[in-house]
Amino acid sequence: MSCPIGVFDSGYGGLTILKDIVKEMPEYDYIYLGDNARTPYGTRSFDVVYKYTREAVLKLFGMGCKLVILACNTASAKALRTIQQVDLPRIDPQRRVLGVIRPSVEAVADFTGNGHIGILATSGTVASESYLLEIAKIHSEKGFLVTQQACPTWVPIVENNEMNSPGAAFFVQKYIDTILQADPQIDTLVLACTHYPLLRSVIDRFIPEGITVIQQGEIVARSLKDYLCRHPEMERELSRRGQIEFLTTEKGGMFDKMAALFMQAEVTSRHVEL
Ligand code: DGL
């Protein structure tokens, strides 16, 4: 039976993660599901993000996925724990749902020299304090100083393909200046939203020298590879035809055009209801 790896995001952003996962492990099959009809999740409540994410995970399980990656920081922040602790034991304890926050948090220690870390994310991820809590838990002895900044206009800029507009530059500079004013010693900035890599060239224009900007795609891809090495019982289940299926809750063909931008390759999607 076919057992692809499920990759879920509220919209297009998770494609930046999928791209790096496929680059690292092209042999497996993947199903990407974007809930574009209900994006953005970043401004929604815990209950709503959990409900939507759970529906998406169940859809991917129903399509044969035994392993699902929440390639969305907001879903990882607001829904992952409940899905892992409450839903999975009831639905099927053999299935796994993994997020993007933990691997990113584990990786920050490799980048920072002075322990001053900045988190750029959606309002929802910032409000969840997931990065603060995870960093405090995983790197408790290191005394990292973490500053968060919500960048509420960045996702709509990307969703509307306005990355190269003067408005994009204005809003990118605004939030970078704000976080660097809050802690001028920051030496590591995490792009803690899967949409933000699409703004990378604009972001780089406003980052002073000496600051490392972390994107999550490669980190999550390496972490998933490591997970599969440590869990051969899951790895054995995965099908290997090197195929990617794209699903979206949006109608009207917009997805393919935007997804091609994210994947830098042609994309043909299928509409699904959750
Ligand atoms: N993909 C989401 C994230 O990484 C951002 C988009 C949204 O707000 O839905 O947080």
Image: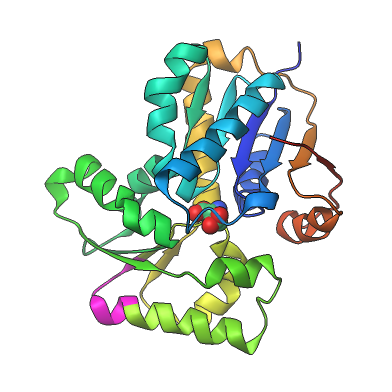
Percent x, y of residue 128: 33, 51
Percent x, y of residue 259: 76, 55
Q: Specify start and end residues of the magenta stretch as a single range.
A: 179-188
Q: Quadrant of residue 241?
A: top right
The residue positioned 62% from the left and 37% from the top of the image is 7
Q: Is residue 64 visible?
A: yes
Q: Is residue 22 magenta?
A: no
Q: Relative to 218, does residue 2 appear above or below in the rendering?
A: above
Image check: 224 left or right of 86?
right
Q: Quadrant of residue 179?
A: bottom left
Percent x, y of residue 211: 37, 72
The residue positioned 69% from the left and 51% from the top of the image is 37
The residue positioned 24% from the left and 46% from the top of the image is 133
The residue positioned 75% from the left and 22% from the top of the image is 240
- Which is more toward the observer, 122 or 244? 122
- Which is more toward the observer, 35 or 192? 35
Q: Relative to 27, does residue 99 appear above or below in the rendering?
A: below
Q: Is residue 180 magenta?
A: yes
Percent x, y of residue 8: 61, 39
- Which is more toward the observer, 93 or 58? 58
Quarter of the image for the C terminus: give it.
Answer: top right
Q: Is residue 184 visible?
A: no
Quarter of the image for the N terminus: give it.
Answer: top right
